[in-house]
Amino acid sequence: MTSNKKDPVLVVLQMTGAYDALNTFIPYSDPHYMDHRPVVNIAPEDVLAVDDKVGFHPAMAPIKEMYDQGKVAVLQGIGYPNPNRSHFRSLDIWHTAEPEKMISEGWLGKAIRDLDPNKENILTAVNFGRGLPRALAASGVSVASVGDLSNYGVLTGMQGADDRSEALDIFARMYAPMIGTGPVSDYLSQTGLDALKGADILSDAPKTYSSSVEYGGSPLAQWIKNIAQVHLADFGTRIFYTGVNPGTFDTHANENITLPKLWGDVSNAIADFHEDLKEHNANEEVVILLFTEFGRRVVDNGSGTDHGSGSVAFMIGDAVKGGLYGEYPSLEPEKLDSGDLHWNNDFRRTYASILEQWMGLDANPILGDTYEQFDLIR
Amino acid sequence: MANNDVALMAHLMRRAGFGAQYHELEARASKGYEAMVEELLNPTEESHGMDLDLGERYFIEWNHFIRCVPEYIAFRMVNSYNQLEEKMTLFWHGILCTADSKGQSQVTENAQMDMLRRCGMGSFKELLLEISRDPAMVYFLDNCLSHKESINENYGRELLELFSLGVGMDGKFNYTEDDVKECARAFTGWTIANAIPGQPYGRYSSQFVYNPHDHDNGEKTFLGETGNFNGEDIIDIIVKQPATARFISRHLYNYFVADEAQVPSWMDTPPRDPETIKMLEDEYFRSDYNIRSMLRVLFNSDAFKNTKFARMKGPIDTVIGTLRLVGDWTTPKPGFEAIFEEMKHMGQEILNPPSVEGWHTGKEWIDGGTLLRRINFIADHVGDVGYPGIQSIVEKLAAEGPTMSPEGLVDGCLRLLGHYEVTEQTHQELLEHARKSGDLATNTREFPQKVGKMLQLIVATKEYLYA
């Protein structure tokens, strides 16, 4: 570890729609696997085996390569109590780290508050995608949320550079807080000015960036490229968040056709990101958490797989201690939970490990309890 | 037409509808305020004024409502003359929530929207009965999984907590955990035929079925009353509770008058305007739980008329309102997906409330990302002088004389957007900008551009976030 190493950075990749854990990290030698998956399966000889039991989907070769270099932690059997098979409720649970009740603040929102309690940097966290995930929401916390970095800002559609620049000055003055207008108006002022300032800083990132890496054309690959651009621009961002569009991995039908394409795109984007960071000598500074909201039904439906529970998540990066964590849930029919995998690895153990070992934060107040950690970080 | 009358009509149409262009405001105002309230309260199948037939031929999915239901709903919001009918449908769908993300059956969800359109301004008791039998709801809250031998409390709980009584009122709980269980018992046997997820065989509609063999016929005690209750009896008991009157009144107030505290805090946070809430509660009981009567009292009250710009627009208000203002989507055309993307980016999707709690409102709509998205969406539209609604603003301003002063430009734009009111600080900024160009000749090619830029600045203000 070098002495000028920067503050550790977390990148969260949300694979919305619920990828099929059984065909992502595959228990290929378990005789029950093919019994449960007569149609929607990966032939054992195609699996990128990591040992004599489990292995990666063939389209995840770039991730498998990083696994072989000890840079990928596989969090098997991950889930939460009383599995919920609704996409939105399940995502909500992952976002708030609270399976029992509805709460409004996200685990990363609270982490941002701890990382930057005096709100010194409006870019402590940056989200790329549509709308702000609840994971990043917390009262008093500003998060820059960017759909398209090349076109991010206030009144970006206004014609004429001079007119727009004048309009932004007017905007700044109109959003200046005024005494006695009340908390809501103050909040709007703060949000407007932070967004204006954040956009101003962020718009410089692509200008200073150069790289020999060429990312793919999918929205996710472009957002991951944006993350590299912003990280390499040194704005002090500690948390990046992005993901695929809602429903992307929701493979109820045609899974054999769609899943390879999806994992190919995602794996290549992650490998490109890693190459890019390496080229800029920044590969030690960033770890990735890749997760999805739940697992899918163990038995296929003849074309795809329905909603289930018990999943797999991944931590990826040079600073990650690679290997297998948690247990692969049993596929024996009598050990299933109403036809689904039995989770055995509370997702908050992973959150706690990241918060404490990587971000250097106290996990208990953020997660509301203490969870046994994995030894995940070098 | 007196300016005050048009300003009041602009207020009514922002709240009881999705806003309107100036000429429509003038036309509606000319009928008189109270008469217009009555017109809005009493929509008919003939008065919506839409060419839905054309829509069906264009969006062929509309024939069976298998897909494109959000498009259909948005099309109605943009084009129906019966604006309140569509606004009420959205109101109820934000309270009696179901979500396509779980149901994944637009044919069933469309049937629910139809029901809300039909019953949304009638008796609240009827509405609760209808929603309890609504297939999308029965599936969404798992009542089809509730059996006499093993109850599923989901519907029983949300019916009390989120659809009628609310958790508590004036610091006291409105019901107990036992009431939840007894309520759930009374609704056993209320189920559906044809389970909803159509995968992998495709989607088909489902029907409500009452299965007497799966109904728990035992004695139940609910909110202090004892009997062999079925679901209808539970609803009879619910609707006569003062807490239900309070709950519905606060929701109407929050939606139509001014941003209230978020619903989960209502037990301990008193209403913002107790007098108006009391007036609505009284009307609820006087009219036998009639929503139309409550709305009539509300819209004709001074409390409503005097509370302009006290409610943050939601993303659907914003997007639909903008389309109506500029005159886009008056006929079907491709590209609605992009419009839905905008709503989604701003934080609200038609047919998809984030949870059974519905959408949080007020300032919770706004964060850095949603704010920019909102401002840029509106600004891109009002700055495009090719839109008929914007052309009409330009023409109206040009018709005022050969030259236009900076004051005339600022105040004219504010007026034609619907009599918007801004703070002195904002007004000064807009005026200073206008003064840089001095008096404008209104017959030049540059004039529409100047108007467009002024409109863009106005829609970027904090004030414009409100309706």
Image (tube, rainbow, N blue to C red):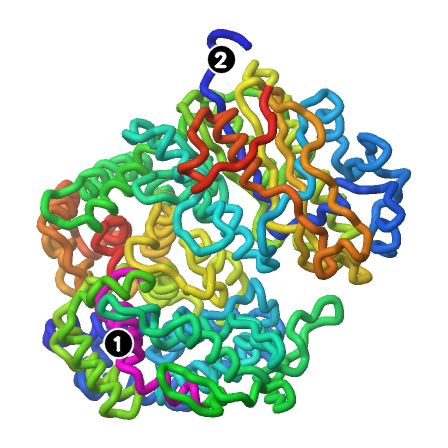
Q: Nearer the viewer, residue B52 or B131?
A: B131
Report the amino acid beneath label 2.
Lys
The question of residue A16 being in magenta is answered with: no
Q: Residues within 10 Å of mark 2 (few under 14, many from 20)?
A: few
- Same-chain check, marks 1 and 2: no
Which numbered circle lies on residue B246? 1
**Is A123 on the left or on the right of B417, as rendered?**
right
Quadrant of the image containing the C terminus of chain B:
bottom left
Over which residues does the magenta segment extend?
Answer: B233-262
In the image, farthest residue toward the top: A3
**Is A253 on the left or on the right of B212, as rendered?**
right
Residue at x 15% of width, y 55% of height = B422
Report the amino acid beneath label 1.
Arg
Residue at x 59% of width, y 40% of height = A220
**Residue B272: x percent and y percent?**
18, 65
**Is A314 on the left or on the right of B260, as rendered?**
right
Please report contact status of discs 1 and 2: CB closer than 8 Å, yes or no.
no
Which numbered circle lies on residue A5? 2
The question of residue B249 being in magenta is answered with: yes
Quarter of the rendering containing residue B19: bottom left
